[in-house]
Image: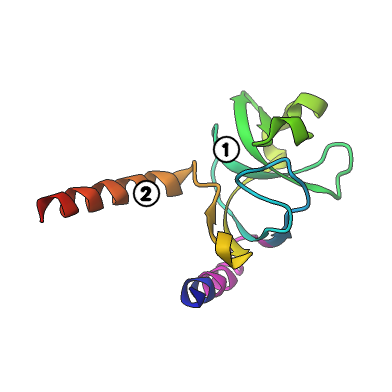
Amino acid sequence: MRTPIIIVLLATAAAGARHRVRHVVVAGTSMLPTLAPGDRLVLLRVVGRPRVGHLVVAADPRVPRRLLLKRVHAVAGDRVDVRGDNPSASTDSRTFGPVPVGAVARCIGWRYAPVGRSGYVGATGPISGWRARRDRRRSRRSGRR
């Protein structure tokens, strides 16, 4: 279990020269069940326009020094509606309105702690498509044996 974590940490360190890498500790329940309080993440900013389902980081419009980790709910022109996965505990676009596209950064992440929950997060973007194709190939191969 340690090897994948070390590989991901080394890869993100190497990518840090070209991309923006952040280490984040989740401090709320707005993204449950995807992210839980105390989860530690390495987030890698990904170039591209955010789409519905993508995980994004945005500055809180009310307290700009505070970062919000949310999921894109809707994109309309140059505005993005961001929401938490746990609506009853989330302060999001329903509270402060849509945010400008330029104020959000699409990201993918790796949860490295707690170890029992480690793995990719934000997998409704390109990673989930890749995983789905991989899983279909594996199931077809196992069916042929």
Q: Is residue 97 visible?
A: no
Q: Which mark is residue 50?
A: 1
Spatial separation of the CA atoms under disc 1 and disc 2: 18 Å
Crowding at label 2, few (<14), some or many (≥20) Cα neighbours within 10 Å?
A: few
Horizontally, residue 94 falls left or right of residue 141, namely: right
Residue 94 lies, in percent from the top left, at 76, 25
* SS at mark 2 in the image: helix
* 47 versus 42 height, above or below: above
Q: Residue at x 52, y 69 (%)?
A: 8
> In the rendered image, which quarter is residue 61 located in?
top right
* 136 versus 21 height, above or below: above
Q: Which mark is residue 31?
A: none
Pointer 2: what residue? 130
Q: Residue furthest front?
A: 116
Q: Magenta residues?
A: 8-22
Q: Earlier in the sequence, mark 1 or mark 2?
A: 1
Q: For residue 16: magenta?
A: yes
Q: For residue 19: magenta?
A: yes
